[in-house]
Amino acid sequence: MKVLVVYGHPNPKSFNGAVLESFTKGLEDGGHAFEVSNLYDINFDPRFQAEDFLQFTGKPMPSDVQVEQKKIARADALVVVGPVLGWFIPAILEGWLQRVFSWGFAWTADKEGMHGHLKHEKGLYILTTGNPEAFYKATGLGDAMNNILKPTMTACGIKSAHVEYLYSVSAVDDATRKKYLERAYQLGKEF
Ligand SMILES: Cc1cc2nc3c(=O)[nH]c(=O)nc-3n(C[C@H](O)[C@H](O)[C@H](O)COP(=O)(O)O)c2cc1C
């Protein structure tokens, strides 16, 4: 498969940077091709712009969005990698989804409802957290996030979506962090 990996962490030396490296190494070893869209590197503007509203009149999206849409169009699968910040995915990733999954490209709607236009086989989020799994379960935050993140992809036509959490990455010991990186590698290899 040709996989687009959208990466939303400002520091390449972070644990997220290591997750990205392990995951893409796994993709390579699994025989997949990939492209990384590193949103901080390209200085992607996540703010929905006045010009973005023109999509609803059939006009083209701004060129920065079109560049990202071409990356999606070249791929068979979409993977989002980043930390959980402020109870959700980082603003740069959320803004990427809001702007790039535009009307006419990713979806349309009529009186019957919404129609997804993406044809991708698979979607995946790999998210690191500060809080432990028990917190995500007890508060319902895990379900709440999954209930938004998965349909963001599947309602736009992507055939399946999964959210993989690597919990408490700043609190766990080195052996667990190593296991997380092995898991990221396997997710790539068995993609
Ligand atoms: C501003 C900020 C907000 C955060 N909010 C959350 C949160 O809502 N839930 C959570 O589990 N972790 C939260 N975290 C912790 C990050 O998810 C954690 O530091 C990150 O996953 C570690 O990965 P890194 O070492 O690659 O940065 C937050 C961290 C920062 C800096």
Image (cartoon, rainbow, N blue to C red):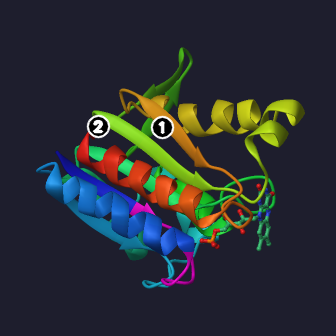
Residue at image position (29%, 44%) is 77
Q: Tag 2, which secondary structure?
A: loop
Q: Amino acid at mark 2?
A: His
110 or 15, nearer to the observer: 15
Q: Amino acid at mark 1?
A: Met
Residue farthest top in this picture: 112
140 or 97, nearer to the observer: 140
Residue at image position (66%, 56%) is 89
Magenta stretch: give its range.
Answer: 6-14
Residue 123, position in %: x, y? 40, 40
156 or 177, nearer to the observer: 177
Asked if one can make out residue 68 in the rendered structure from this viewpoint, the answer is: no
Residue 106, position in %: x, y? 41, 42
* Residue 9 belongs to the span the image colors magenta: yes
Asked if one can make out residue 142 in the rendered structure from this viewpoint, the answer is: yes
Give the Cα distance between marks 1 and 2: 9 Å
For disc 2, the neighbor class at 10 Å (few under 14, some 14 to 19, many from 20) is many
